[in-house]
Amino acid sequence: MNVQRAVVWAAAVLLLGGTVTGCGDERARPAAEEPGRAASQKPDSKTLDSDDDHTVIRLSDGRELSLTYAKGRGLEAKHRDAAAEAWSAPKTVYATAEDPCQGIEAKAYRGTVWVVAGFGPYCRDGEEPQDVLAAVGTDDLSTWATSVVSGQGFEPKPRVRDAGARVDFVDRSWIGTTTLTWKKSSGFASPTETYRPIHKWYVGRWRSQDGTQQLTIDQAAGSRSARLTIESLTGPRCTGTAMLTGLDQHDLTINNFKLEEGTKTAYCPPEDETEYSFAVDSADGPLRLVRIGNHPKTVRTYERAE
């Protein structure tokens, strides 16, 4: 995957938050607070055995948990006490006919166990997972709270907080952070997104050198991505907005353009978003629209507008 398309792919995951479903009584709810501020606890479990289709861990109290992919049924869990030889009957954590991807990750802090597993129709062939399961088990491990993010790109790193009463599944990328939070008191919430700011030189109002178009670029702020507004000043009316993502002053990409008024015209938006990016040379400009490729070419130039 090239850099340009990787940005677009990651941006889509952040913008849409994936498609998330909850199971049982742990239905998806809107998040009520900014996640990730409390200190996390280091897992105290030990992995006893693991391969692509199963994993076994030992909790700090001696209990053991086995998680296994059962073909055609999905992810199943069984457990046993420290002094017991017999396992409990298997419990379905997540029902699916899709193949597992890249193993089953599970760790615990005290009595709180978190699980991450990916599934998809072509995982055995090395494809990315289409569905990523986040699951949490507590107490006697007989019931599990689950949430599923659909769509490629969600690769969470779980963090246990509040002595096991909260788990944040955190996915950090170069454009921002997606967090899926579970709480013992309320179950899984909907994912939250926090966007990284773009380079400050981009922010403001710009007018094309030929006077036909005006751009307004707004900075990212928390869960709101940086935004581009395109407005025609002459000729056919075209007004629209798009999401912006970028690493520095030489790489700002346009994603998910939405026409607000009129009809699409030349560079409103660029014909193929994935083939263009913005670059800015200094705090005073100019701002350049660049067709990327082996031989990048500036196709449109903008100056600061009053």
Image (cartoon, rainbow, N blue to C red):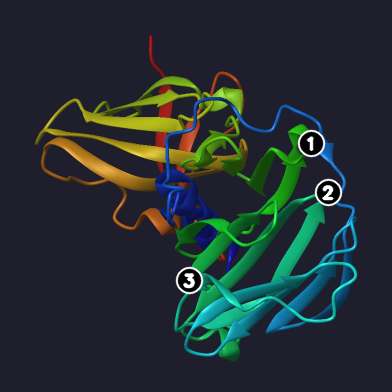
Q: Is residue 248 visible?
A: yes
Residue 250 at x, y = what percent?
60, 41
Q: Which mark is residue 264?
A: none
Q: Secondary structure at mark 2?
A: loop
Real-space Cα separation, disc 2 to disc 1, in angstroms: 8 Å
Q: Taking 19 as reference, is 139 left or right?
A: right
Are circles 1 and 3 on residues that touch, CB within 8 Å? no
Q: Residues within 10 Å of mark 1 (few under 14, many from 20)?
A: some
Tell me the SS state at disc 3: loop
Q: Which residue is mark 3?
A: 130
Badge 3 or badge 2: first in the primary sequence: 2
How many numbered circles does the render carry? 3
Which kind of residue does numbered mark 2 sit on?
A: Arg
Question: Which image quarter: residue 144?
Answer: bottom right
Q: Is residue 75 left or right of residue 236?
A: right
State which tag comes first along the sequence, 2 or 1: 2
Disc with the residue nearer the chain's start (1 vs 3): 3
Q: Relative to residue 266, is residue 187 drawn left or right?
A: right
Q: Position of residue 158 (x, y in %)?
A: 71, 50
What residue sits right under mark 1 in the picture?
163
For the residues bearing labels 2 and 1, Cβ distance under 8 angstroms = yes
Q: Which residue is mark 2?
A: 110
Residue at 51% across, 62% down: 5
